[in-house]
Image (cartoon, rainbow, N blue to C red):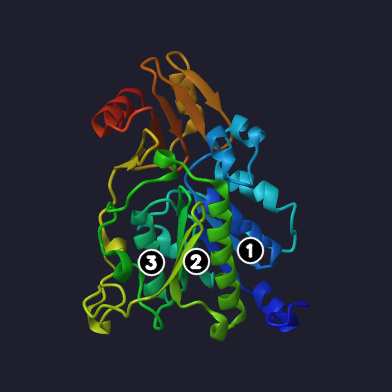
Amino acid sequence: MRFAPIGAAGQERLGASGALIVGMGALGAVLASHMVRSGVGLVRFADRDYVEKSNLQRQMLYDEDDAAAGLPKAVAAERKLSRINSDVRLEPVVTDVTASNAEALLDGVDVVLDGTDNFRTRLLLNDACFKHGKPFVYGGAVSSQGMTAVFVPGETSCLRCLIGSDPDGGGETCDTIGVVSPIVDIVASFQAIEALKLLVGASEARRKSLLSLEIWRHQLFDMKLPPSKPDCPTCGAAGSRRYPSLDAAESETTTLCGRETVQVRASKPFDLERLAERLAPVCAVERNPFLLRATLPEGERLVLFPDGRTLVQGTEDVTRAKSLYDRYIGG
């Protein structure tokens, strides 16, 4: 409140606002911390994954106890954040954000923050935000490089105008070429300050550019966002908008780039207790209230979530992953 551009009135607006963070890895952990510490009234965050020891180098909300317990990131984050600002309402959601639930996750929030690690989900969020008139704060970081921009329906072009419509056209990841943790904090902090400007209504202070950083060689570039493309299905001519990522058919399997993991989605939720009993005679099974991990005789590991998702870890071969899934989980 002592910071004049926010003041008491701005702090009240923050308290009456809501933010959605999708992805609670490196970027999401920093984003959530800033939103909670800034007093944003509702902070909803969604993530499909659980904490592993390799995350700890850059994912600042988590520790070795979280990794040892195999806690979903959303659950571990809620436990930490609830001890930081009890006036904020936290809504952790353990889920894979897809076309079937993306729009519902936007309900009741005023801004959407990108903590994801892939352009398929970013394009999905981009479409959902532009369909429902919500600002989308994009961010990405890998190696020592980062990028961030703010896309506001009716005011700017969208992410699809900037990168095209190929969700798999996207380059390296932290799991393939690594990341130095300071770039994560820097990019997420740039995202967070733009979110605060949006939430307090400081439109004159907003950055209207794509910011690119390379912190190892100390390079910074600011590029003005291009105008909306007339034929863009997301933000082009009003009569031709289709939001293709929201209409796309959902795949049963998804390869998680650089992680030797294939996600398989079942058609219905899992009864983890029943599955643990079934798998225990043939696998080494670990269980907590949120997930089940089964190390297979073949060497791979299955991680099962109550919502019907399975991570097949140890392979990027979709055919092998499906074969193992069918062998141990079935239809």
Image position of 44 with respect to 280: above or below: below
Query: Sequence-wise, which precedes: disc 3 or disc 2?
Result: 2
Q: Which residue is mark 3?
A: 126
Type of residue at label 2?
Answer: Val
The residue nearer to you, when weighing 315 against 175, is 175
Q: How much space separates mark 1 and mark 2, taking CA atoms?
A: 12 Å
Query: Residue visible at 55% across and 86% down?
Result: 204
Crowdedness near tag 1: few (<14), some (14–19) or many (≥20) residues, C-alpha within 10 Å: many
Q: Which residue is mark 1?
A: 35
Query: Residue visible at 75% across and 52% down?
Result: 83
Q: Position of residue 115 (x, y in %)?
A: 49, 56
Query: Residue visible at 60% across and 55% down?
Result: 30
Image position of 109 with respect to 270: above or below: below
- In the rendered image, which quarter contains the N terminus? bottom right
Q: Which residue is mark 2?
A: 112
Q: Which mark is residue 320?
A: none
Crowdedness near tag 3: few (<14), some (14–19) or many (≥20) residues, C-alpha within 10 Å: many
Query: Sequence-wise, which precedes: disc 3 or disc 1?
Result: 1
